[in-house]
Amino acid sequence: MKHKEIKRVTDYDMQQLIGQVLRYGVLISGAIAIIGGIWYLYQQGSGLPAYTEFHGEGKGFTSLTGIIQGLGNGNATEIIQLGVVILIATPIIRIVFSLVAFIFEKDRLYVFITLIVLSIILFSTFGGLSL
Amino acid sequence: MTILTFTLILLLGAYLAGLAGSLTGLGGGVVVIPLLTLFFHVDIRYAIGAALVASIATSSGSASAYVKEGITNIRLGMFLEIATTAGAVMGAVLAIYTPVNIVAILFGVTLIFSAAMTLRKKHEGALTEGSKLSYTLKLNSSYPTPEGVVDYKLKNIGGGFSIMTLAGMLSGLLGIGSGALKVLAMDSAMRVPFRVSTTTSNFMVGVTAAASAVVYLQRGYIDPGIAFPVIIGVLAGAFTGSKLLMKLDVKLLKIIFSIAITIIAINMIYNGFNHKF
């Protein structure tokens, strides 16, 4: 019966799933940061760091399209930035997985609560707050 | 100093930050900001970007283990994340209108508060009777201990929710996880047992930091040259810390660390007043 299978999704399953999402997110972003970082040092390691004055990063580092373009050109810095984006996305993906789990658990209250948290983060991402 | 030496020293510093952060429960961000600003003279805005990245890395890295063990209260975390993420967004907006030296002073004050919180005695016992709201929101739960599964109930949900909003704002403004305020909300106000409040707080840090990191990334605060040694160092440090935690008596370590960050905090406040940021 389909109904029974849905009921079998428990808090325990959700804990295991969320644990895996967080672990793989961190491992993948860490691995990408290492690859990009080594390449970056190979390319620019002998240069001088210039961080005492704040300039803000260019388009290539601050938007997904910019990062993807830089990746196409084989830029080490954009590879690192991709790792950063995956790291930031990991807790957000965790929320999406919790949402799905609460839907399967038929916990309407927590589907609603999770949707609020997700909307706040989406607003923060796409709400033009960066200005 | 070339980029190579800068990277290697930062990598080592971030490793120690992750190690100290995981042993004391304060997270990686609190050490990363003073390390970058006071030691490397990096602009505090880049430091805030790096600290957010460090907070997400430590939170996600250690939360994966705690969640699987079933200590973390996912519903409580989810519910309180409404407060912390909303607060974080407010903090990220406030940051535009806050002069950097005020940010440095606020950071110093938060640091001293965190040091005091680390040494404070936490509630061990679990309440047997919760408030009405704790039942409505299904926040009461249980957690595994060596003596068996312990049930616990919560009170003062509104109070905890309010402190969490403040914790989120500070996190969005300063780039730290503000784990100390999160534990204060859960421990003192809601009476969540210690093990549950620390792991649930840690679980929430990632989402809270992500809510403001998406803004700071677009604002250009996150530099790849700083981010990669910080991510790798903090992750490796937190991993070592979680292994050591079982074998070490962290009591003395917490006292030493609290004194150290209080000195750093005074330094940040002093420089903030003298507009050295």
Image (cartoon, coloured by chain):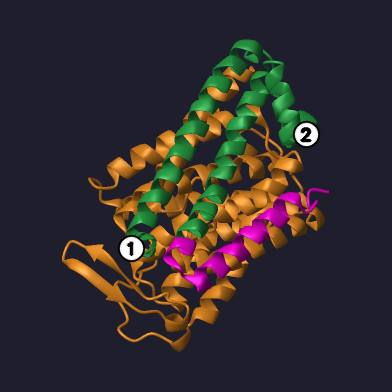
Chain colours: A green, B orange
Q: How crowded is mark 1: few (under 14 residues within 10 Å), some or many (20 or more)?
A: some
Read off the residue under disc 1.
Answer: B195
Q: Can residue B256 be seen in this view?
A: no
Q: Which of B237 and A1 is in front in this view?
A: A1
Q: In this view, does A64 lie to the left or right of B159?
A: right
Q: Is residue B171 above or below residue B233?
A: below
Three-letter amino acid code of the residue under disc 2: Glu
C-alpha gap between disc 2 and disc 1 = 42 Å
- Tell me the amino acid under the disc marked 1: Arg
Judge left or right: residue B147 versus residue B271: left
Residue A53, which numbered label? 2
Q: Give the range drawn in magenta.
A: A102-131
Point 46% across, 53% down: residue: B26
Label 2 packing within 10 angstroms: few (<14), some (14-19), many (20+): few
Q: Which residue lies furthest to the front in this view?
A: A1
Q: Point out residue B156 in the picture as x, y percentages from the top left corner.
A: 48, 83
Give percent across and percent down for residue B231.
52, 34
Residue drawn at (67%, 25%) of the image: A78
Residue B116 x/y as whole percent: 46, 63
**Residue drawn at 59 percent across, 23 percent down:** B6
Front-most of A8 and A127?
Answer: A8
Is residue B21 placed above or below A113 in the rendered structure? above
Main SS of the magenta segment? helix
Q: Is mark 2 on a helix, strand or loop?
A: loop
| Residue B207 drawn in magenta | no
Q: Nearer the viewer, residue A30 or A9?
A: A9
**Which type of secondary structure does the marked residue at label 1 adopt?**
helix
Residue beneath the point at 64% across and 11% down: A43
Question: Mark 1 falls within which chain?
Answer: B
Q: Is residue B76 above or below residue B207?
A: below
In percent of width and height, residue B251 lies at 30, 55
